[in-house]
Image: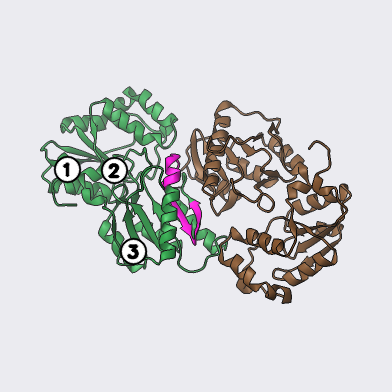
Chain colours: A brown, B green
Amino acid sequence: MDGSIAPVLQTAEPLAVLAGGGALPVIVAAAAVRAGRPVMVIGIRGEADEEITAFPHKWVKWGEVGRLLAALRFHRAQDLVLVGRISSRPDYLSMSLDRGGSLVRQAILRIFNGGDNSVLLGAVRLFESRGFRIVGAHEIARELVVPASWLSRVQAIPRDLRDGEMAFGAAKAIGRLDIGQAAVAIAGRVVALEGAEGTDGMLERVAALRACGRIRWQGKAGALGKCAKPHQDLRVDMPTIGPETVRAVAAAGLAGIVVEAGQVMIAEREETIRLANNLGLFLVARESDAEGDV
Amino acid sequence: MDGSIAPVLQTAEPLAVLAGGGALPVIVAAAAVRAGRPVMVIGIRGEADEEITAFPHKWVKWGEVGRLLAALRFHRAQDLVLVGRISSRPDYLSMSLDRGGSLVRQAILRIFNGGDNSVLLGAVRLFESRGFRIVGAHEIARELVVPASWLSRVQAIPRDLRDGEMAFGAAKAIGRLDIGQAAVAIAGRVVALEGAEGTDGMLERVAALRACGRIRWQGKAGALGKCAKPHQDLRVDMPTIGPETVRAVAAAGLAGIVVEAGQVMIAEREETIRLANNLGLFLVARESDAEGDV
């Protein structure tokens, strides 16, 4: 944010980016290159965008752990960013493990038996136990997070801003229970809490509840609140919003978005803010209150 | 439960039942009649079942507040039970107020401006300010709530019972935030929290998330937890489960249900338990832990 170079970039050692889908892997790779750090992008087949081919890259399939580890070692990469959307959740039973994968079969089995949320954290442990260092996308591309600030030109009326604060507080509360990280409030009432469906799924639900009259409030009102869970591993599992989120918030008839400053990534920030302004939505980043204070 | 007659029934004064949909109004009316208390059922047109016509009854439309108050006064009913499902949320703008309704227009406007949840509480205040006493359905038909007990013949494996406890704890936590009263946990993870969509809507979501692989756990697993919010007005807004809930829990692939003893109504209890047994689901009522302990 301040134009200085992040400490993690002040090295000539190569940085590996294990890339899922969406624009984030390219943003991270470009930020590293801009800072003069060599980059190696490893795209997950069927997930990563073609745009990663603008960088030195390799493709791996789910389960090709041996191929992945070999590529990392060949390029002498010790620092690894895991970034991007994973749409097809890997299924251990249908995953064809290569030789390296078979060697870590026990670790992989433990990952998949632990339930959805443990997949990423299991992957982190797997890489760390082999000497790699996991680096957060926002440590490389620091513009992905924002300080406390009003981001949209659009302002909020007091009622909608109160809803944003209420939704933010509810999101923080369920985050402390390690459940979800987002909530929606409309006209002084929390109407939706995020579970396994994710933020976009929750916003679709709010749109549906308004369409069928179950939420009776007419016209643009209410807000989305989104924050990090207190014990979230921000290196691999940072809450993220982007243009899609803004579109879903508009479709749900909400008036704006309140995110946690420094803890929520804004993918494609310029486009996200432009879209919020065009759709008449407010977008604000706020600090979290002291623990237990919300 | 113990066969004694509830204190509220030890009077020959008529009891009025303002009836929404479903079996509950008839169950309440029948319980009063069994105890020797005269009953007057006032069915909300388009909501209440035809079965209410087995009792002395009158029909009113939304907004016919004057007609309703006149009927209550004519029958000298001071005690009033508000019970049954309201599927079509009343819309103040489309509601044709009768003369009595017009006189209480300000009160009704206040009710509708307060958001969904306040409709019932506003109705309570409206009736109480006119000298009526609101009685809970479970005070009349005491068999609607159950003490702490294992209700199904079906037992739970430890993993599913832990999920039930986890879901119950999450439901209690969001209840303390005055948001919802139910949650679902599967394999050690809370996957859904109830908001404005209601319990059935939440269970449909869990079914959909499993169908699309977003919740990857295969086979019957997990549980629904349901409890009262700490400040819920149990006279008019008691959490309820019934055969439909059991069917929705089975459709969501869950293994059972944990409800709060004494605080959650079980409509059509025999049918509900029979159905749980037939579908292989456990059903248990437990006490709530001390406040703040969950």
- Name the residue tied to disc 2: B83
- Name the residue tied to disc 1: B56
Chain on which label 1 sits = B
CA–CA distance in space, label 2 to label 3: 24 Å
CA–CA distance in space, label 2 to label 1: 16 Å
CA–CA distance in space, label 3 to label 1: 34 Å
> Do circles 2 and 3 both sit on a common chain?
yes
Element under label 2? strand
Looking at the image, is mark 3 or mark 1 earlier in the sequence?
A: 1
> Do circles 3 and 1 both sit on a common chain?
yes
Element under label 3? helix
Residue B168 relative to residue A63: left or right: left
Disc 2 versus disc 3: nearer the observer: 3
Of residues B249 and B22, which is closer to you in this image?
Answer: B249
For disc 3, the neighbor class at 10 Å (few under 14, some 14 to 19, many from 20) is many
Q: Looking at the image, which residue is at 77% across and 62% down?
A: A43
Residue A282: tell me if it is visible. no
Residue A71 relative to residue B15: left or right: right
- What percent of the width, then of the height, locates residue A186? 52, 36
Q: Are marks 2 and 3 in contact (CB under 8 Å)?
A: no
- What percent of the width, then of the height, locates residue B30? 18, 49
- What percent of the width, then of the height, locates residue A229? 59, 46
- Please report the bounds of the magenta region as a residue range: B172-192
Q: Which amino acid type is marked by label 3?
A: Ala
Looking at the image, is mark 2 or mark 1 earlier in the sequence?
A: 1
Residue B108 relative to residue A210: left or right: left
- What percent of the width, then of the height, locates residue B191? 51, 55
Looking at the image, is mark 2 or mark 3 earlier in the sequence?
A: 2
For disc 1, the neighbor class at 10 Å (few under 14, some 14 to 19, many from 20) is few
- Relative to B128, residue A132 above or below: below
- Name the residue tied to disc 3: B276
